[in-house]
Amino acid sequence: MDVRQAIDTRKTVFSFLDKPVKDEIIIDILEAAKAAPAAGGIHEYEFIVVTEKPKKLELGRICLTPNIETAPFIILVVCNQDKLTRVFDKGDSDVFCVENAALAIENILLYAASLGIGSAWIATVQQDGIRKLLDIPQNYIVRGVIPVGYPSVDSVSKPKDATPNLKDITHVESFNNKA
């Protein structure tokens, strides 16, 4: 599947088949994530791959997201903002930490979709609960929890918002000049 097809067909999946994903595919997905662009070329994010069922269940409870334990694995994207503050001021580091992680997460979602693998981005996370569960140091920020696996037949995708008409959101040369 090409990139445009992955973009157009990607869905948010929260229910997965009891079918393992090969380690090589997990590594490929992580390779795609780390290929994302990053502010200043600083890749301050790291990945935690969770496969143990009790931890996946607890992540679902902490994130208020049922069924994610059905995913063969869950990727957490965590950021060490200290790496950014060596180059950027605190305010910029805060922003770039979110942006860099979001770019890596988008690569995970799209690459997985291109392989026929479902995923979801759970962005609202309880930092302290997840840090405690997975022994994450205090200087790291959890930016995403992504269950990944083959979608179940009854997998319910959250509907995509109706996308706006391109002419309604495109401006040429200045904001007041609609396309």
Image: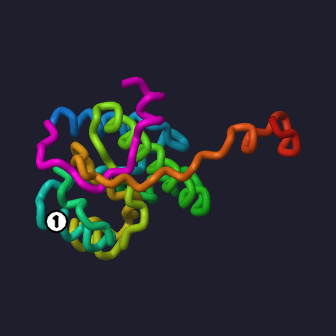
Give the quarter of the image for residue 115: top left
Q: Image height check: is 38 above or below 126?
A: above
Residue name at image x 16 percent, y 50 percent = 72
Give the labeled residue for mark 1.
55
Image colouring: rainbow
| Percent x, y of residue 116 | 28, 35
Q: Secondary structure at mark 1?
A: helix
| Percent x, y of residue 122 | 38, 60
Q: Residue furthest right?
A: 176
Q: Image height check: is 57 above or below 81?
A: below
Q: Amino acid at mark 1?
A: Lys
In the picture, measured across the screen, residue 36 lies left or right of residue 61, that is right
Give the quarter of the image for residue 127: bottom left
Question: In the rendered structure, does residue 5 fall within the stretch colored magenta?
Answer: yes
Question: In the rendered structure, does residue 50 fall within the stretch colored magenta?
Answer: no
Q: Residue furthest front?
A: 154
In the picture, measured across the screen, residue 30 lies left or right of residue 2, that is left
Residue 103 visible in this rendered orientation of the protein = yes
Residue stretch rendered in magenta on the structure: 1-22
| Percent x, y of residue 147 | 27, 53
Circle 1 residues within 10 Å: few <14, some 14–19, many ≥20: some
